[in-house]
Amino acid sequence: MKQQISALMDGELFDDEADTLLDSMKRNLDSHEDWLAYHLIGDVLRQPDHIHADISSAMRERLQAEPTVMAPRIRSTQQKARWFALSAAASVLAVGVVAWMSVQIAPESVPQLAAQQQSNVRPASMSVERAAMQRSMDEYLMAHQEFSPSSDVQGAAPYVRAVSSSGRQ
């Protein structure tokens, strides 16, 4: 196809061959680019004066005449609103994650923690009663040690507890 287009441009095709080629070029869109390329080659060959034209000085003058834009781009209100919405969503998400993590770490609520702290502050007489109750609890546990889940473990662990517990009295 390219050889026929070149021959047509050079005037070497007969009329019936040229008509057939032009009809096939109308159906084939890729041949249109070849047609334009061969026309450009023909124009350059016919007018060699324009080939070596120095366009650098004309181009430099046109570039110097253009204004230099150094101002920053103005952000639209839509973009500002988007940044504000995204930062607010990130802040809310961060607070939610911190709250969720604190609930997972310490499942007790704040009022329960406050009540526990207040219950730890007792008069001296209550701490003596608590110590007596702890001793009686230790005695109970020692008496029923065979029913504790730790007795399933074979070895010296039950005896160590008995020896260390008996030293507190």
Image (cartoon, rainbow, N blue to C red):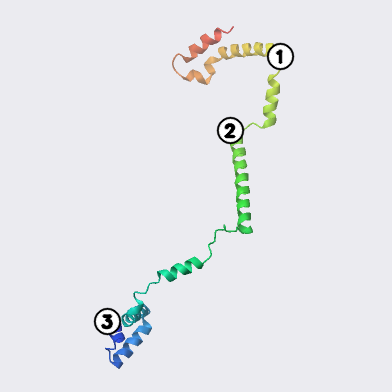
Q: CA distance from mark 1 to mark 3?
A: 113 Å
Q: Which mark is residue 126?
A: 1
Indicate whether 19 appears above or below 80. below
How many neighbours does mark 3 have within 10 angstroms: few (below 14), some (14-19), or many (20 or more)? few
Observer-side mark, 1 or 3, equals 3
Q: Which mark is residue 155?
A: none
Dividing the picture into quarters, in which one does residue 124 lie? top right
Q: Where does the C terminus fall, quadrant-wise?
A: top right
Indicate whether 101 appears above or below 119. below
Disc 3 marks which amino acid?
Gln
User: Is residue 30 at all visible to an observer of this figure?
Assistant: no
Disc 2 marks which amino acid?
Ile
Sequence order check: which comes first, mark 1 or mark 3? 3
Residue 11 spot, x, y in % from top left: 29, 89
How many neighbours does mark 2 have within 10 angstroms: few (below 14), some (14-19), or many (20 or more)? few
Give the residue at mark 2. 105
Q: Which mark is residue 3?
A: 3
SS state under label 2:
helix
Kindly indicate whether the residue at mark 3 contacts the one at mark 1 (C-beta within 8 angstroms): no
Residue 62 spot, x, y in % from top left: 48, 69
| Left-right relation of 100 to 28 | right
SS state under label 3:
helix
Q: CA distance from mark 3 to mark 2?
A: 81 Å
Residue 109 spot, x, y in % from top left: 66, 32
Disc 1 marks which amino acid?
Met
> Residue 121 versus residue 63: which sits nearer the camera?
63
